[in-house]
């Protein structure tokens, strides 16, 4: 019997301070022995978004306690841990350095292997915590800072098929919530408000829907929501209609672009067994899940979603990416530094800024 690897994961790339202990199991997935996530929502709520300095201070104040709690809850001592994984990017440097430095320190004093994890690889591999999913698969990564279609060929092997050319989808949800005064964090509040509105009431733009392959764009949609929101101040019914119309438009965009991404995936990977994994914070949105499930029924592929609590930022996914990299001997020295930008596919074209040709 091969030894089952146990890892401590640490995550502080944005506004969640998180630590987790996980262990491989016989099913090819992981036992999550602890998964502590301390959200800073209340601290950022009054500003309507994440304030980097406040986030970094909150990480510093709680990280030690969170790691201790994760170890205690797991009933695993540091001695029994095979390695430490911490998020090294992409994200806010002031935040990343808190978790990264403490992870490196624990690895150094306990003489354990250290893995610096790309937060996006954490999201990309997160369904593997609970599903024994085989490579390659198609990934739709929709989070607060990213919106991309990628082929996940293996651990550390990614090919980007498309990306947003402006805002990330989570950002579009957050900004819509702010414009409609629905509260923070934006995604869940827009989803809730949408249930009370008429999705067909407003006709909103679907930017680059008929061009640029499976690349995405949400800036024009956001501007349209801003324009309409100014005309409906004080009218809750219309506010809910606008939230519902925004979410419906997002679903139409994702439907069309996912269809294109599946075709691209099929051309590149010769398989009839296609798995679409949807990961990242926005993957918690039930209407998006149902929308893509409907598409999967039509096109004959399978959708895989991480458990709702594993969609947003957490350290179990960082520990899992750590184990996967450790097993491929992809270890890091403790002089590794935090990176604010760290694409999964280093060869993908940069799709933002003036002069962009679609
Ligand atoms: N139910 C939901 N519907 C839509 N969006 C949601 C929902 N729940 C969370 N989100 C959005 O998910 C985002 C947070 O996801 P996540 O924590 O993965 O992002 P991040 O870590 O800040 O960014 P990244 O992973 O790109 O670095 C926020 O923008 C939030 O509004
Ligand atoms: Mg994230």
Image (cartoon, grey):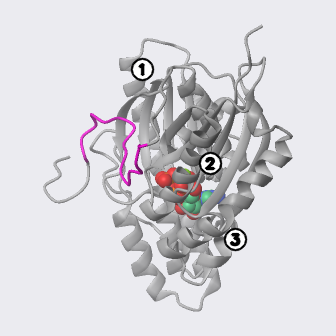
4 over 113 or under it: above or below: above
The answer to whether mark 1 is within 8 Å of ligand 1 is no
The residue under the point 53% across, 90% down is 233
Q: Under tag 1, what secondary structure? A: helix
How dense is the environment of label 1, judged by Cα within 10 Å: few (below 14), some, or many (20 and up)? some
Q: Under tag 3, what secondary structure? A: loop
Task: Say which residue label 1 marks.
Answer: 266
Image coordinates of residue 202 in percent, x first then y, are 49, 70
The reply to whether callout 2 and callout 3 are in contact (CB within 8 Å) is no
Q: Earlier in the sequence, mark 2 or mark 3?
A: 2
Pick the front one: 126 or 33: 33
Most extreme residue toward the left is 355
118 over 206 or under it: above or below: above
How dense is the environment of label 3, judged by Cα within 10 Å: few (below 14), some, or many (20 and up)? some
Task: Let me know if residue 350 appears in the view.
Answer: yes
Report which quarter residue 18 is drawn in. bottom right
Task: Let me know if residue 304 appears in the view.
Answer: no
Distance between the alpha carbons at the discs numbered 2 and 3: 38 Å
Image coordinates of residue 147 in percent, x first then y, are 44, 49
Most extreme residue toward the bottom is 234
Task: Say which residue label 2 marks.
Answer: 10
Image coordinates of residue 88 in percent, x first then y, are 47, 47
In the rendered structure, which segment of residues is drawn in magenta? 335-350
Q: Is residue 84 magenta?
A: no
Most extreme residue toward the top is 1
The residue under the point 69% across, 50% down is 19
Q: Earlier in the sequence, mark 1 or mark 2?
A: 2
The answer to whether mark 2 is within 8 Å of ligand 2 is no
355 over 85 or under it: above or below: below
The reply to whether callout 1 and callout 2 are in contact (CB within 8 Å) is no
Task: Say which residue label 3 marks.
Answer: 196
């Amino acid at each position: 019997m091969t030894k089952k690897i146990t890892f401590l994961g640490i995550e502080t790339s944005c506004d969640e301070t998180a630590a987790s202990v996980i262990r491989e199991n016989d099913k090819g997935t992981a036992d999550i022995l602890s998964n502590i996530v301390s959200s800073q929502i209340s601290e950022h709520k009054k500003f309507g978004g994440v304030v980097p300095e406040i986030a970094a201070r909150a990480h510093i104040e709680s990280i030690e306690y969170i790691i201790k709690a994760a170890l205690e809850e797991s009933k695993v001592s540091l001695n029994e841990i095979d390695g430490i994984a911490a998020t090294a990017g992409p994200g806010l440097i002031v935040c990343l350095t808190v978790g990264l430095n403490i992870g490196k320190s624990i690895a150094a004093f306990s003489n354990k292997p250290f893995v610096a994890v790309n937060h996006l690889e954490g999201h990309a591999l997160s369904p593997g915590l609970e599903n024994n999913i085989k490579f390659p698969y198609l990934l739709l990564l929709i989070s607060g800072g990213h919106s991309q279609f990628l082929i996940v060929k293996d651990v550390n092997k990614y090919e980007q098929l498309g990306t947003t050319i402006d805002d990330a989808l989570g950002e579009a949800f957050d900004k819509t919530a702010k414009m409609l005064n629905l509260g923070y964090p934006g995604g869940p509040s827009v989803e809730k408000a949408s249930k009370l509105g008429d999705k067909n009431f407003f006709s909103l733009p679907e930017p680059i829907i008929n061009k640029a392959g499976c690349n995405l764009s949400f800036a024009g949609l956001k501007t349209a929501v801003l324009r309409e929101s100014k005309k409906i101040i004080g009218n809750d019914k219309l506010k809910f209609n606008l939230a519902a119309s925004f979410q419906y438009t997002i679903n139409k965009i994702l439907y069309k672009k996912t269809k294109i991404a599946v075709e691209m995936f099929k051309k590149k990977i010769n398989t009839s067994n296609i798995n679409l994994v949807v990961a990242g914070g926005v993957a918690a949105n039930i209407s998006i899940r149902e929308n893509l499930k409907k598409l999967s029924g039509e096109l004959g592929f399978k959708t895989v979603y991480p458990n709702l609590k594993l969609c947003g930022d957490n350290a179990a996914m960082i520990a899992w990416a750590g184990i996967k990299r450790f097993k491929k001997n992809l270890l890091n020295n403790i002089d590794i530094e935090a990176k604010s930008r760290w694409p999964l596919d280093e060869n993908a074209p940069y799709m933002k800024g003036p002069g962009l040709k679609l």
